[in-house]
Image (cartoon, rainbow, N blue to C red):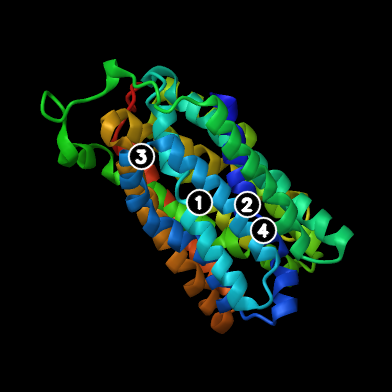
Amino acid sequence: MLPQFVFARFSHHLCSGILVPLLPLVRQDFALSYFQIGLLTSAFGLVYAFAQLPIVALSERIGQRRVMIVGLMGMSMAAIAGGFAGDYNQLLASRVLMGLFGSSYGALSSSYISRSFSKESRGQMIGLHLVGGNLSHLIAPFLAVLIASLSGSWRSPFMVLALPALLAGGLLWATVPAEGVVEQKTALDFGHGGLGWRGIVRNIGVLLVVTTVLILVLFSIGSFLPLYLTDKHGVSFQWAGILTGIMLGVGIVGSPLGGALSDRIGRERVILYSSISAGPLLYLLTVTPMGLWLLAILAGLGVTVSFLMPVTESLMADHVPGPHLAMALAMYYSFSQGTSSVMTPLVGRLIDFQGMDRVFQTLALLACAISVGALVKLRLAGKPSSGVR
């Protein structure tokens, strides 16, 4: 079933990734401010966040697979509708619908896969699953720019790149069992020796906060990265989209590597090492001129993000009982995506008033503060445990 889920995640992220590389063209067509651009990019994430909990509750009544299938197909149709948008409000509405249908995949798929593999291999399997999303991040900007260049319109990529999600929904319906294979040996029981929610928060709460804040900063910068590259470095919108894809696409290697590494040396160590590197890399992004070093920094940031995501999901799967995992992941996604979706238009408004350089440098300094805190925690802990934390 793993290849089907990899393809499903690929098609899901292909839909959600169409807009960002095309923002320079959309801005020109609709005469948008940075604040309006921020609303466009956050509309998907905001609805995606708030729909997580009711979608997971619905899946507990009618089944995870059924909800994922309807969600993938609905997301595809909403993305296609975006290509026909006649004005800014219609495009914004399509993003809202994409967020609603798209919320049916992330938490449910990660829960389904996590419950189907033991703790010893879970990180690697989740990392392999995320390869689908990383691959779409790599090629979606290139394909979107290519299709837009050949067709002469930013609308064509929406109509073409949304089609794989329809196929992915059909594949899940035809090949994936209705229920995941639950790993009973590692499933905790809250009432019989389990830690309970308070114990889980006490054990992994700090790490979740660290990864959430870093991902918020990285995604806020990533939402405006194509515009940053065009406005500051003067690159064409085609190259801006491709460079953004490089940053996200290196997760093809980073996600399975980070997940497998966490299986061997522990989730906490991988999270802390990734956190320590994030701040300096973000700061270097703001001061490095266009060239090979900037490409290396973008790739490094991509590796950092791709390490954090599968390890965080694996960390939660290690501590949360199987029957509660989907809801726990939904709560995590709801908070992180919701906060990110609110933060993105606010960052856009700050850019309108303060300029992109100053805002990017402020976010980079925030990430540097987190990096210092992660370094202190790593040193205070002494020699980290080799087990999973």
> Tag 4: residue type?
Ile
Residues at circles 2 and 1 in contact by the CB criterion of under 8 Å: yes
The residue that label 4 is drawn on is 80
Q: CA distance from mark 4 to mark 2?
A: 9 Å
Sequence-first tag of 4 and 1: 4
The residue that label 1 is drawn on is 102
Number of residues whose C-alpha sits closer than 10 Å to that of mark 4, classed few (under 14), some (14–19) or many (20 or more): many
Circle 3 or circle 2, nearest the eye: 3
Nearer to me, 291 or 184: 184
Q: CA distance from mark 3 to mark 2?
A: 25 Å
Position of 219 relative to 118 (above/below) = below
Any mark on residue 62, and which?
A: 3
Left or right of 313, for residue 322: left
Residue 114 appears in which quarter of the rendering?
top left
Q: Looking at the figure, which quarter contains the C terminus?
A: top left
The residue that label 2 is drawn on is 15
Name which residue lies at 57% across and 58% down: 283
Q: Secondary structure at mark 1?
A: helix
Number of residues whose C-alpha sits closer than 10 Å to that of mark 3, classed few (under 14), some (14–19) or many (20 or more): few
> Tag 1: residue type?
Gly
Sequence-first tag of 4 and 2: 2
